[in-house]
Image (cartoon, rainbow, N blue to C red):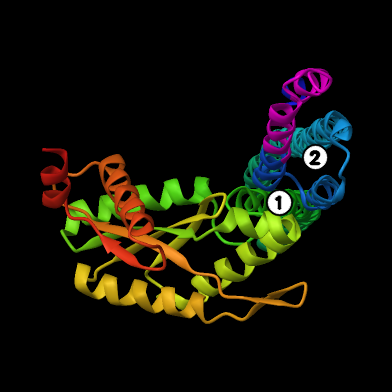
Amino acid sequence: MYQHAVIELNKSCTPSEVDTKADISFINDELQLLILELDVGQAFAKKLEKVRIDISNDPDPFQLPQYCLQVINIIIDSTREERRTSRHFLYTLNDSLTQFYLNFAQTLKLSEEDFEKQKETYKTIHQGADQLQANSKNQTLEELQASISDYVTNVKAAMALQEEQQEEKYRTKFQSMVRQIKELQNETQSYQKTLKQQNKQLHIDFLTKIPNRAAWSERLKTEVTRYQRYKTPLNLAIIDIDNFKSINDRFGHLAGDKVLNVIAQTLQKSIRNADYIARFGGEEFTLLLPEISPTQTELALNKLRDRIKSIPFQFKQEHLTITISVGFTAFTPSDESDDVFERADTALYQAKRQGRDQVFQLTKNEQKSENQ
């Protein structure tokens, strides 16, 4: 895009300057759309948004390559930050695991040492028993009782001392290991939370705050699998804002952004929990409506159309009524996802061709008839 902008601007002094201006305007619009689709951290997303607003408000086309470079630098900085964060976590995790391994190895070594000490204790006890047995032949009953009593006392004292030493040693060691395990768990949970947030950002459209195209692709696979397994109805609709380009041309891209945001939020709030809507690109949205018939789907889509039409938009003291066109179709057992999307897209085209601001359904049989 940067190279394209430079090439077109170099043509500005040629007889095709009018065409060049059109190309520059196209690159301008494409760059703004690209910015909206980039997945970066929150801090970098704010920087990108500022660049996008600057692009929208700057009448000088010769600044476009500079804006391209700003976007490139922000992407690079975002990638470096993500890499730095991941590297820091991996280093921390590696250090924690290394320390845990060393402590575990030390605990095993202590266990071996304690086992050797225990063997020595048992050996001493056994020797004491042998000595007691040998002496008992030459002792009176009273002397034997005293020897046995001393022997038992010594055995208890030796066992108690060994148990106390072992208990204290292992208590300290295991407390240290438990603490390290908890720290490791906390670090892992923190990183998992970061990854979940990043994953969520990757699946949310920055401008409209609804699912994006990547999220749509994943949900579509899930719904199609469910449809194939349970054979319950599944409908796919494509929604397009009518005459959206004229809004950008008359009132600027910020007005167009506001329209996209308001319509996206209205659609999101107006559908059922089982439905799924996403921004597919530009001013186009895709919608999955499972477990309802095509007739019920048409009614639901017309309600959405009426709701959008009733939103009171106002730009530069001018009141606007903005409408949407909708094309939809139902899945059939022999359908592939691409076939259904193409059929819904054809239905959308029919809705546009017949005057916009309407819902048009196209069945598989109707599509076959058209193709014939």
Residue 204 appears in the figure: no
Residue 150 position within the rendered picture, expressed as x and y whole percent measured from the top left = 76, 58
Q: Quadrant location of the C terminus?
A: top left
Whether 288 is drawn above or below 3: the answer is below
Q: Is residue 124 magenta?
A: no
Q: CA distance from mark 1 to mark 2?
A: 10 Å
Question: Does residue 330 appear left or right of residue 112 in this picture?
Answer: left
Quadrant location, the N terminus: top right
Q: State the residue position of label 1.
A: 194
Amino acid type for the residue under numbered disc 1: Thr
CB atoms of marks 1 and 2 within 8 Å: yes
Which residue is denoted by mark 2 in the rendering?
85
Which is nearer the eye, 138 or 332?
Answer: 332
Which secondary structure type mostly characterizes the magenta part of the structure? Answer: helix
**Which stretch appears magenta?**
5-28
x and y percentages locating residue 132 in the rendered image: 67, 47
Q: Amino acid at mark 2?
A: Thr
Taking the spot 30% from the left edge, 48% from the top edge, the residue there is 346
Dot 1 or dot 2: first in sequence order is: 2
Residue at 32% from the left image edge and 47% from the top image edge: 341
